[in-house]
Image (spheres, helix red, strand yellow):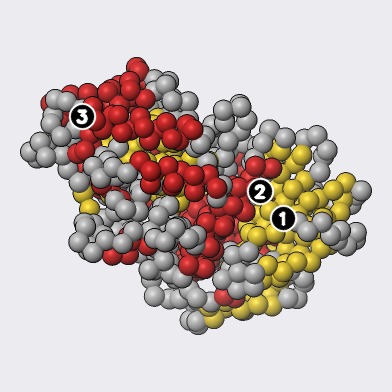
Amino acid sequence: MFTDSKGKKLFILGVNYWPSSSAISMWSHWNLEELEDDVKRMKGIGINLCRFFIFMSDFMPIETQVDPVMIDRLIAFLNICEKYELYTMPSFFVGHMSGEDWDVGWRNGRNILTDSNMIKAEKLYISEVVKATKQFKFILGWLLSNELPNYVGQQEPEIIEKWTEEIINTIKYLDSKPVSIGDGAWSPEVVSEYDRWKFQLRKLNKYQDFVGLHYYPRVMKPDHHAYTTAFRLRMAQNWKKPVFVEEFGTSTVLCSEENQAHYYREVFFSALINGAFGTMGWCLNDFDFKDKRPYSHHAFEDKFGIVRMDKSLKPTANEYIKFSKIVKKIYSDKYQKIENNAGLIIPSNYYYKYPYQFEPEFDRWYDFYLETFGLMKNGFNDVECIFEPAIELNHENDIQPVDKLDPKKLPLVFAPRLKLFTKKYWLSIVEYVKNGGNLYCSFANDSWVVDWHKVVGVEMDCKFGVPDFRDCMELEIKVEKEFGEFQVGDRFKISLDNSHPEKSYCKIISDDAEILMRDQFGSPFLHRHKVGKGNVYFTPYPLEILALGSNDNRLKLAIIKIYKAIYNDTYTQNIVEIIGNDFEFGIWKNIESGNYKVIILNHSWENTKGQINVKKNFICKDSEGILRDESGTCSFSLKRKGVLHIEIQKV
């Protein structure tokens, strides 16, 4: 996405910035010496970019004029950044910041997005800033806002789109640098909740040049928290614009300093592994305000920094130093990321509301697909999200998701909870399988998918309005055929839950497929059905729905083993295989030497052991330079949230 001043690929390792003495009053309580001290500190710990905020209430105290004193101060700050070669991304509209909204005094309740005089003032403001600063070569790009959805409230998508187009065109008329909205990508295409979030990627990506994610995941299952970075990146990437993590972090009021460092390390490496072009933490400095809003009422906002008030470094700052050294080596034209992906198909009603769906309708879409995504990552790591195009009225010009239903490009796709696809898209999935693709799907009660039972290869006994449940709370499964790590005769148990129709199973009368596993009632638990040149793997139990509401680790491990076996049925020639749970990894090939670099991240909060298997004629060399077992298998142990760097060398 971005290159540095020498034309080399640049991975943004950034931070969001306010000075500690003044925070959001940076421009009115001006201290240039402090700003320079902070810029030097950023560079010293490996930070290469800061996102800073041009407070509109300071820069435009009256509606018809931008304060020239503030423009001079902005230029002075940018001169310091140029002096130390620190890249910047200025943000224009800071209506929301750190738990409070901040307005210009002359707004008088007018709508920011629709009032013509407000828009005139906004365009004057942006134009004056861009004209005064566009010559600075270390400005990498422009951000329209900070979390604009919080500030503007509920607005219709068409209004948001029109305003975005007009404001971005104002910038583009004056300067060619890339522009993004700064909305956090709180869009239904990423987080669902289409009735709540109106900033839609499929509309706004027509105008912005890149997408910036903001997220602060709380009160989550450990796996959900761990895979949030990867999941949101993969969800946003399918809409045809580059994506990075624009804002993330945690206050050391909410966790220990050590665990803040663990979290940053996890996000850094997960972002790199999953194709982000950078990350920016919130934020550089701690604050200490008793009577200054918003810190007086959001006291935990004081301690989001990676630098303490006495200017000593928290452990997180050292994560910047270590990661910057690694990313400089691997994020270059010399290395090519290697992925053998399986697709997680996201139905269009995840992000678009069709009329009159069945009630009660399942509403935990985000959690459900994050759950499945994490299980897939545990099973085989290389996952991308594939979106079904929505059938929308009068939206022909919206950005459409990338279509990957080609067996040659993507030989394996997963459709958990096979419940809602448009007819046209379901037929395209069937055609994909007939042409050699492989599909995994699990049962969904009240499925709208036409002839799904014929495609998966069963005669079913589903009833209208009456879900079927097993008269037990535990299922025992017997393996009928060797499949991945499963051996014939193996048995395992999982918990059932009969509390909701979504957790019901499919009663099967007959099965025309190859039975891989059966339950204790003699019914199929998992089968493989040949359809044309491809295969359909089907389970009559809603495994992912059960996993979402369960703390039964046996179920999680069973699903992971099943996923991995299906994946290995499809991909048989991988150079590297990582064995173990809770690992995420990335593989990069050196296009000059033919060797590989592997980064392994432990997502667990426990110390975890694993193995690396490599193909013949390759050996492992770890980050300490110790040659490992030449048999092709290397054992390793990682501390919680730990990272291992491996080089795979040709013998």
Q: Which residue lies furthest to the top in this view?
A: 173
Mark 3 or mark 2, whichever is nearer to me: 3
Sequence-first disc among 2 and 1: 2
Please tell me whether residue 149 is drawn above or below residue 368 in the rendered image: above
From the viewer's perspective, is residue 501 above or below residue 25? below
Q: Which of 350/542 is in front?
A: 350
Q: Is residue 355 left or right of residue 529?
A: left
Instruction: Tell me which residue sits at (74%, 48%) in the image.
Output: 597
Q: Residue furthest front?
A: 33
Amino acid type, label 2: Ile
Q: Position of residue 265 (x, y in %)?
A: 56, 58
- Residue 251 in picture, x, y percent from top left: 39, 63
Q: Name the residue under label 3.
A: 67
- Amino acid carrying mark 1 in the image: His
Neighbours of disc 1 within 10 Å: few (<14), some (14-19), many (20+)? some
Task: Out of 401 and 527, give the one closest to the viewer.
Answer: 401
For the question of whether residue 529 can be seen, the reply is no
Q: Quadrant of residue 309?
A: bottom left
Q: Give the Cα distance between marks 2 and 1.
A: 9 Å
Which amino acid type corresponds to the residue marked 3 in the rendered image?
Asp
Q: Are marks 2 and 1 in contact (CB under 8 Å)?
A: yes
Q: Name the residue under label 2.
A: 326
Q: Which of marks 3 and 2 is nearer the N terminus?
A: 3
Name the side, left or right, on which 415 lies relative to 37.
right
**Residue found 80% across the figure and 34% down from its top:** 592
For the residues labelled 3 and 2, say whether their Cβ atoms are less than 8 Å apart. Answer: no
User: Which callout, 3 or 1, points to the residue nearer the camera?
Assistant: 3
Which mark identifies residue 645?
1
Q: Distance between the residues labelled 3 and 1?
A: 51 Å
Q: Is mark 3 on a helix, strand or loop?
A: loop
